[in-house]
Amino acid sequence: MNDVKKKLGWTEKGILGWVFAPMGLLFLALGLLLWYIQAGDDPGDPLVFLCVFGGMGAVFFLIGGGLLLWELKRRRAARQALDDGRYVMAKIVGVQVRTNVNTGRGNPRVVECHYQDPDTGVTHVCFSRYLNFDPTGILTSDQVPVYLDRNSGKPLFVDIDAVLPPMEIHQ
């Protein structure tokens, strides 16, 4: 494989993890701090602060941490599949706009591709990472490499950069 590092992209879950985990950690620390300095007028107030702020913080931190762990596991599996080099060529069937995601540049697009497993006859539908432009007219091939997990054979990474020309995006 060449020395160019492939862009694995971040999913919604990973981005939410990056937002929720630090926010939860902040609320958890605030709850512990308010409990430690015995904030409030009544004797039970520090425990209330700990339960409310610390409880909310713990919930947000656990959800965010779980989402981050899921995303990092997905990225590690995709990187392992790339390193193993086992791939199939999938046919590009179209470009879809992801209207459920909105960035500063509008809605990102993904390239949809299909391939059929010759052993089982099952057709797999895969999607590329998010692209912040419409690649419809500039794809250099009608097939794209899809890297597979060495153990299960599941598709893990669509190498959309392999069918895109070198480009610079100016904004």
Image (cartoon, rainbow, N blue to C red):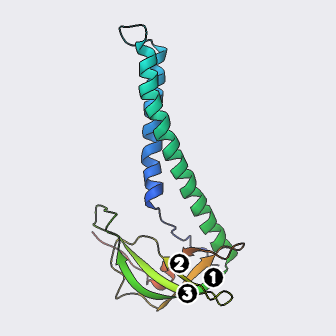
Residue at 57%, 62% in the rendered image: 75
Q: Does residue 157 lie above or below 35 as drawn?
A: below
Residue at 34%, 88% in the rendered image: 137
In this orientation, does residue 30 appear?
no
Pair 1/3: label in front: 3
Are the residues tagged 1 and 2 within 8 Å (C-beta)?
yes
- Judged from the image, the secondary structure of the residue bearing numbered disc 3 is strand
In this orientation, does residue 109 appear?
yes
Q: What whole-number distance in Å separates the C-alpha atoms at marks 3 and 2?
A: 14 Å
**Nearest to the observer: residue 65 or residue 123:** 123
Q: Which quadrant holds residue 106? A: bottom left
- Judged from the image, the secondary structure of the residue bearing numbered disc 2 is loop
**Nearest to the observer: residue 141 or residue 44:** 44
- Judged from the image, the secondary structure of the residue bearing numbered disc 1 is strand
Label ID, residue 159: 2
**Nearest to the observer: residue 129 or residue 62:** 62
Pair 3/2: label in front: 3
From the viewer's perspective, is 137 left or right of 54? left
Residue at 63%, 75% in the rendered image: 154
- Earlier in the chain: of badge 1 and badge 2, it is 1
From the viewer's perspective, is 79 left or right of 103? right
Q: Which residue is mark 3?
A: 115
From the viewer's perspective, is 124 left or right of 13? right
Q: Residue furthest right?
A: 151
